[in-house]
Amino acid sequence: MGSSVKMSVTNVLKEKYWLFILVAIFIFSFILDMYVLTRYSFSYGIDGAFYDIQVRNVIQYGFPMSNDPPLAYYLLTPWVILTGNSFLGIKIGMALMGSFLAFPAYLLTEFYARGKNVGSRVPALLSAFLVTVNINYFAMIGDYLQNLVGVLFLAVFLYFAIRWFENISQWKKFGVLTVLFLILNLLTHIYTGALAVLLFFALLIFNIVVKKIKTGKLPIFDLKILIILSIGILGCFIVLFLVYPVMYTKFSTVISFFNSSSSTTEGRTVTSPFTAMIFCSLPYLVGVLAAIIILYRGLKEKITTPNLMNRNSLLAWLYLALAGVLAVLSFIPSSQYQSRFLLMAFLPIALLVPLGLKFLETESLARYPGRKHIISLLVIMVAVIFAFSSYHTASEGFDNMGPTITTAQYNELVQIKQNLTVENAVFVAADFQSKYWVEYVLGGNVTTSSSIDEVKTEYPNSTIYVVTLTSTNQLTTNQSSGGFQQPNGNYEASFLLPYGPPILPNSLDKIPTGNSEQKQPDSRNGTNQPPGNMAGSGNNTGTLPGSMSLNGTPPSLSQGNNSGLTGANGQTPPGGRTSSQGLSLNVSGTTVFSGAYFKIVRYENEA
């Protein structure tokens, strides 16, 4: 009895070894994400407490304040409720959703097979690793959470789309799931949603054209789907544009890419001398070439049943379309949004590089069937090298990830909250980085308008407080290349690795307006500085920041406690570029607070 059970377990391990490794990759990715994201208690990224504000509003009122599609906020809310801490809850939710990318990436790579020589599962496992452990992934999980959630839904959408179009008559199963994840993309972010729509129509039109050429007849069923879903997607866009007016701005930003070769935005000129380098590594080019060959072979095959399509052809076409669209959007200089498309390029890299490896493996097995063990060993070695290089490149930037606010700066905002009447008040912040932290702690209406007259007109019956940063103590910001500074490695050798060349050049750094190149004095440890000259110091609770209360008011963090500033290793947040030097406002008002980091001037609105 015992020996039979032992043999059964052994057989399961032999047959399902890939499942254990895949789950291990998922767990490793989640642990790595949590390690990086919890080194500092505060929220990371150029948007600071933006997501915390949205989740707090969802908990209090049932809907977020942002005009963006709201799905990501609702998905993060349960984790905040579960942990009772908005900072930690959002990090756990994002780490889980980001790590889940490993599963669709694995399944997509496993689609490709050539006859009986299907090869090993090593390339698919490599895809699962590359998509969750790479330099772009960590840049997105630090700054662009919505985009990363959208990439997850996009990857799942690609999987179900191929399953559906392989046999388009299975619309009740895979068709419904494909449309569902297409809608989820649209409800997450305009960029990944628009990309999913482009890929969907590229796949559907490809399907119709190939069948027409091969059979000589128009596939009526496919045309019906094209018409019905075109109307449905158009209706979905109409609803999004009506409900979320910000869609007009973001959509026009995408369109403007095609009408400009360079752009000057927010006081800085954006150029892209090395943008194309991300698509020039040898493993990536091998993957692109493999996809082209796979597509060519698939197109030569006959279509025996009108509803069936070659899976390999669909996979290769979708990969090439994804890579092509992102390459076009990345090559055209634009405003700060160009970096987002460059960051999303980690998805085609993580899919095409393993596809190229699997293609070479199956081709070698077909030609040299007696050398299976040698070929398998070589594939494993290459996969390990690629995986290690991807991890190493990403890890070099971990120390540059962190919040844009320190414990002392946060506590000063909490002190202002305790001593300032904010009812019917409007705060005018220096920039978006300080805006979200001011809004999170102080509450009320917060704007970044540069004109008091505009604020006065918009809020005629409100007290206006101008919140400026002191000239020598700016909010720290380690945002380089979208919040993730690029490592300095061997540039020539990097072309042999999947994520080798610099992903984002310095010319695409997220540099705010003002004198942004000056280095900030190291005021990050200034917790013993005077708290300001406003009467009443308030009482610090000593609790961790981000803890949720019934009214959503964030507590202070004890001056003697660095939990919000350091992680378990005691490190301080990395230095970097400073924020803008404050508002250019000639305000004749009353100074109500002047601290080490913030200055508050009250402007009496006489309207």
Image (tube, grey):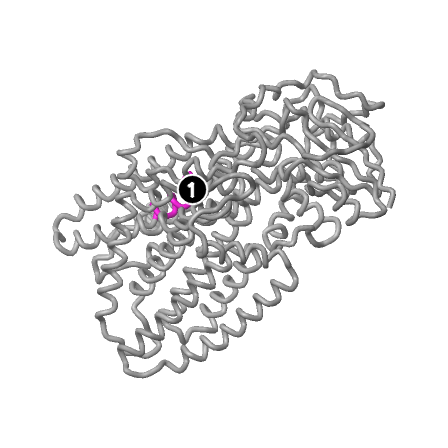
Percent from the top left, x then y, of residue 85?
67, 38
Which residue does the image show at 41% across and 35% down from the upper left? 394
Q: Using the image as rendered, state which of residue 476 and residue 254 is in the foreground.
A: 254
Which residue does the image show at 36% across and 59% down from the upper left? 321
Q: Using the image as rendered, state which of residue 385 and residue 397 is in the foreground.
A: 397
Residue 367 relative to residue 437: left or right: left
Residue 534 relative to residue 370: left or right: right
Looking at the image, is 65 positioned above or below residue 380? below
Q: Name the image quarter holding residue 223.
A: bottom left
Looking at the image, is 175 positioned above or below residue 45? below
Percent from the top left, x then y, of residue 542?
73, 25
Which residue does the image show at 40% across and 70% down from the upper left? 204
Looking at the image, is 42 positioned above or below residue 90? above
Rate crowding at label 1 as few (under 14), some (14 to 19) or many (20 or more) other CA atoms within 10 Å: some
- The residue range painted magenta reads 125-135
Q: Name the image quarter holding residue 449.
A: top right
Looking at the image, is 435 positioned above or below residue 154? above
Percent from the top left, x then y, of residue 451?
72, 42
Please tell me whether the stretch drawn in magenta is mainly helix, strand or loop: helix
Which residue does the image show at 36% across and 56% down from the upper left? 324
Find disc 1 in the rendering and name its residue: 271
